[in-house]
Amino acid sequence: MSSLKKSFNIRSRDFIHAGEASITVQQLLKQMRIDPALIRRIAICGYEGEMNVVMHGGDGLYRVEINSDRIVLEISDQGPGIPDIAKAMEKGFSTASDEHREMGFGAGMGLPNMDKNADEMFIESVPGSRTRVRMLFLCKGTK
Amino acid sequence: MELSKLAEILEASFFNGKDRSDIEIDRAGASDLMSDILAALSERGVLLTGLTTIQAVKTAVISGVTAIVFVRNKKPDPDVVALAEMHGIPLLSTPCSMFVSCGRLFDAGLTGLDGAR
């Protein structure tokens, strides 16, 4: 299978459309008959990532690359960046507003959920500038 | 149990999906925190929540939740019902509180989303 690439824009504070990229890719992967457990992990990571951008980031991008042996998911945004990545990875740590909590988010589980569900996850962030979260999913012998 | 039985136990009414009330439910998760639902296994599970937002439905789609029950008679907006219908997720509303809903479903034999009792 040759590589299939898709990308979707994520708009800051667009809570109405947040999650659409993840659901679209979830449906695409179902059509491709990818392992349902793997699809679920990819969908959760994408959705948590999208919500992070919508709540905390500037505008961003959801990109996925589907190969026969691996799927790479990348969520990036145009800031404001994460000052302390180790702190942001702690379960329960959150900088969410009351508005985010009223919508059911901001429990401080986004990045930990993504890390738990991806086979590998890398975060690059420049405080005041941008963040990029890259996740790798192996199509066989995974979590 | 079938979703119709769950609705009977919770005295719940359907906003959509009543024609699929024979789907099987054997797990339940109760939370207003979407990440809690995303962190748990949710196949054949029902989500009990007080949140009637569009993100509650999207969380159900992503996590594989089978149906959503809004507690304390909460009612979703029509666009939330439309999104749920598009994804084949029945939405219901119960007059019961979250606590009483959980108690009744536990008593009826449902497990948590992770299968625990």
Image: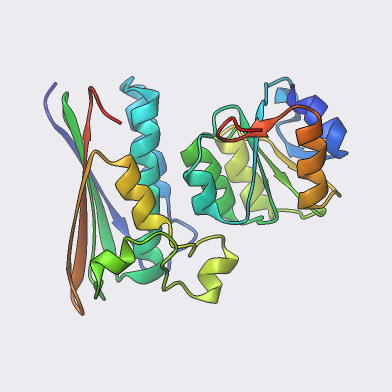
**Residue at 68% across / 35% down in the picture?**
B90
Q: Is residue B103 visible?
A: yes
Residue A120 left/right relative to B77:
left
In this picture the colour scheme is: rainbow
- The vertical placement of A31 against A137, above or below, is above
- The vertical placement of A104 against B83, above or below, is below
**Residue at 48% across / 45% down in the picture?**
B38
Instruction: Return the residue found at the far front.
Output: B117
The location of residue A118, given as percent across then percent down, is 28, 41
Quadrant in the rendering for residue A125: bottom left
- The vertical placement of A65 against A93, above or below, is above
Q: Quick one: A21 or B73, which is closer to the camera? A: B73
**Residue at 82% across / 38% down in the picture?**
B104
Query: In which quadrant will I find the C terminus of chain B?
Result: top right
Instruction: Return the residue found at the far left.
Output: A2
Tally of numbered tags: 0
Quadrant in the rendering for residue A93: bottom left
The location of residue B95, given as percent across then percent down, is 86, 49
Q: Is residue B93 visible?
A: no
The location of residue A61, given as percent across then percent down, is 25, 57
Q: Quick one: A114 or A55, which is closer to the camera? A: A114
Residue A82 left/right relative to A19:
left
The location of residue A1, given as percent across then percent down, is 14, 21
Quadrant in the rendering for residue B6: top right
**Residue at 22% across / 22% down in the picture?**
A140
Q: Quick one: A57 or A24, which is closer to the camera? A: A57
- The vertical placement of B6 against A134, above or below, is above
Residue B6 left/right relative to B47:
right
Instruction: Return the residue found at the far bottom.
Output: A128
Query: In which quadrant will I find the N terminus of chain B?
Result: top right
